[in-house]
Image (cartoon, rainbow, N blue to C red):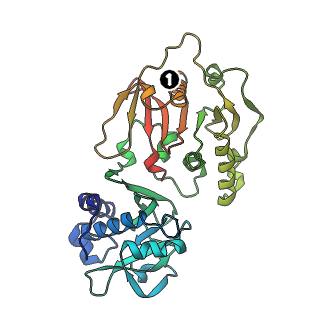
Amino acid sequence: MREPLYPAARSVAPRLAAHFLETRGLSARDAASAGALTPDADAIEALVDAAFWASLRREEGYAPEISLAFLPPERAVRPLRLAPPLPLGSHALSQLAPAVERPGIHLGVWRSRRGAELEVWGTTRVVPPYCFVLEVVEPGLLVVKHRVSDDSAKFRNVAVFQGEDVKILSRPEQEPDCPALLRPLLGAEVEEGAVESDLLLRLAISMRAHGRGGTLLVVPAGSESWRESIVRPIGYAVDPAFTELADFLSRDAGEPDHAAVSRAVDAVAGLTAVDGATLITDRYELLAFGVKIGRPDGRLRVERVRVSEPVEAGAALVLAPLQLGGTRHISAAQFAQDQQDAAALVASQDGRFTVFAWSARAGMVHAHRVETLLL
């Protein structure tokens, strides 16, 4: 193979190779002897390098949006196979991009019969758990991920490449300061079909997708204390509470219609684009939107917050809320300080996503930066 030209690919590839071995509980020798679908460092370096340079190309004015899966065609489900396969490279990837840009389609990459080079053998729509997947999100932005289990279609992000900056994500168990409600946002596995623990993650992704920025307040069901932190009159009160999302949690509802869940999630997330905050309970009942957050009389102004990102070797910082963003971030931090049994989720127009929640251990608001998990 040609010498890779993207320095980050070489520097991070050994760590990613070790990660995928660790997730399978294999040593490098075991993986080789068992023929496991785990790429070595050289293969990862070549995949990342080709995808990075492909992301910077244009075909008829469009930037490529592709997903690569390190998988032999024999292990794919109903593969579409090219004859002959194409050498892995930025030109081939950008040429194929228009055919595979829709979600759920992966370009299959595997070693050639000679074993020395990687080649693109075709496409597949199903990949096995822990299969190395590399997604080109936008120019210069790549995400390494894998499916979490045989019983789940969900993927977990492992690393994010953005130009020269590379972040390897930590595992959920390494983030003990996160409230249980928010753990799915940090990549914690949820039981397949467990709609309740999945809804907040879906809402966060949908909030980020509309690109207008917004705030979602999550308060305890049955509590009225949140009203102390809301300026009257409420922008758009909902009475009675809108319960379409909550209805999916009912045991009598049976197996959820995932398309219907997605439509309901997008409808609620779309409300966060309205000026002000959207307010739901932790049972996903919509109470209001377009609300303004205020500081209750006698409460202290939030002066500092603990900030962390779920990345390996990432140190938490203590910052003033103004250092995180503007009015939206400051008011969300104030709400989390005053309503310590609630949480505030903030999507920025630039794609950043921050979850504010009270940390009893730190004695202050904790701001979790989670946009790398939502790509």
Quadrant of residue 19 in the image?
A: bottom left
Residue 375 is situated, as x and y percent measured from the top left of the image, at 48, 53
Closest to the observer, 180 or 131? 131
Asked whether residue 187 is in view, the answer is no
Q: Is residue 335 left or right of residue 250?
A: left
Asked whether residue 94 is in view, the answer is yes
Q: Is residue 323 above or below residue 131?
A: above
Q: Secondary structure at mark 1?
A: helix
Quadrant location, the N terminus = bottom left
Closest to the observer, 300 or 48? 48
Q: Is residue 45 left or right of residue 215?
A: left
Q: Is residue 243 left or right of residue 349?
A: right
Residue visible at 49% across and 76% down in the picture? 124
Residue 265 is situated, as x and y percent measured from the top left of the image, at 65, 49
Q: Is residue 111 above or below residue 46?
A: below
Q: Is residue 330 left or right of residue 281?
A: left
Badge 1 is on which residue?
337
